[in-house]
Image (spheres, grey):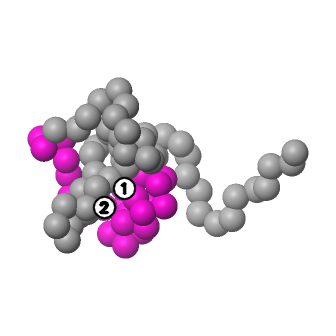
Amino acid sequence: MTDKLGSPTEHQPTLDDLISLQEASVLTGLSLGHLAHLIRSGSLWGKKLGRNWVTTKQAVQDYLAGNPRPGPKPQKKA
């Protein structure tokens, strides 16, 4: 996997690790558009291959483990 800046981290996914956003949508119950938004915003790891977005099951599991909730996030006080 890579971090938001594209530098290598602990695990670089192989082609066998990649799943389509359609598959990720079935796993999560989230729409394709929302998953693509999460990738573009850096909340979910993914890459665009041609005109299709791909991610990994591990990235989806990591995102869901972070207890994502819709709506505005509470502001942290300094």
Residue identified by numbered label 2: 25
Mark 1 touching mark 2, by CB under 8 A?
Answer: yes
Pinpoint residue 52: horizontal percent, then vertical percent: 20, 67
Q: Residue furthest top?
A: 10
Pinpoint residue 9: horizontal percent, then vertical percent: 37, 31
Q: Secondary structure at mark 2?
A: helix
Q: Nearer the viewer, residue 23 or 15?
A: 15
Q: Nearer the viewer, residue 34 or 46?
A: 46
Q: Secondary structure at mark 1?
A: helix
Q: Residues within 10 Å of mark 2 (few under 14, many from 20)?
A: some
* Quarter containing the N terminus: top left
* Amino acid type, callout 1: Thr
Q: Residue at x 45, y 47 (%)?
A: 4
Q: Residues within 10 Å of mark 1 (few under 14, many from 20)?
A: few
* Amino acid type, callout 2: Ser
Residue identified by numbered label 1: 28
Question: Main structural element of the magenta stretch: helix, strand or loop?
Answer: helix
Q: Residue at x 87, y 45 (%)?
A: 78
Q: Residue at x 64, y 66 (%)?
A: 71
Vertical position of residue 71 compared to residue 65: above or below:
below
Region of the chain picked out in magenta, as a range: 15-44
Q: Which mark is residue 18?
A: none
